[in-house]
Image (cartoon, rainbow, N blue to C red):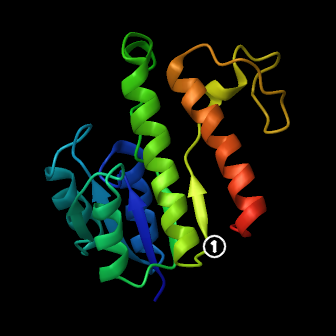
Amino acid sequence: MKKILVTGGLGFIGSHTVVELQNEGFEVVIIDDLSNTTLSVLDSIRNITGIKPIFYKADARVKSDLKAVFDAHDIDGVIHFAAFKAVGESISKPLDYYENNLSSLINVLQELRLRRLDNFIFSSSATVYGEPNHLPIKENAPVKNAESVYGNTKKIGEEIIKDTCKAYNIN
């Protein structure tokens, strides 16, 4: 059974992804610092799927937290949702958003590289496209200047991933 690490796995999108992964037969390990959610979501996942995923209250910005989870489990891939996400708040707290969203991403990618793991999914945002020319937005739409710090962290994150994947052959 493949084991997937889901960072931010108790958030709204993360928890729904965990349910689908478990329903498809994957074993799931979640790390979440509970800054945007509550521990009760873990029980909701168990109630829906009949399976309680492995959970660590951990912060992806803390390398030792990530290392401990990777050391404890044979992870096959990572889905990275851990990020601050409020557009308005990002404008008033830009350094918090840059530090959280980018350092957590970099730490996860470094752990993947060190362990020679190559399966990674990043949760980006339509905000990387700025004000769209057409709706619905398609993936080949031009990327514009982000209109918020949050959007810019996702845009920069995509650039970091592009460079990292090219250098280290990560999917």
Question: Relative to residue 5, is residue 16 depicted above or below?
Answer: above
Measured as percent of width and height from the top left, residue 41 is found at: 21, 52
Of 49 and 139, the residue lying toward us: 139
Which residue is painted at 46% across and 89% down in the image? 1
On the picture, is 80 further left or further right than 140?
left
Which residue is painted at 22% across and 72% down in the image? 52
Badge 1 marks a residue whose secondary structure is loop
Measured as percent of width and height from the top left, residue 127 is found at: 62, 25
The reply to whether residue 86 is in sight is: no
Of 163 and 120, the residue lying toward us: 163
Measured as percent of width and height from the top left, residue 136 is found at: 75, 27
On the picture, is 146 further left or further right than 30?
right
Q: Which residue is mark 1?
A: 118
Question: Relative to residue 106, is residue 113 depicted above or below?
Answer: below
**In the image, farthest residue toward the bottom:** 1
Q: Quadrant of residue 47?
A: bottom left
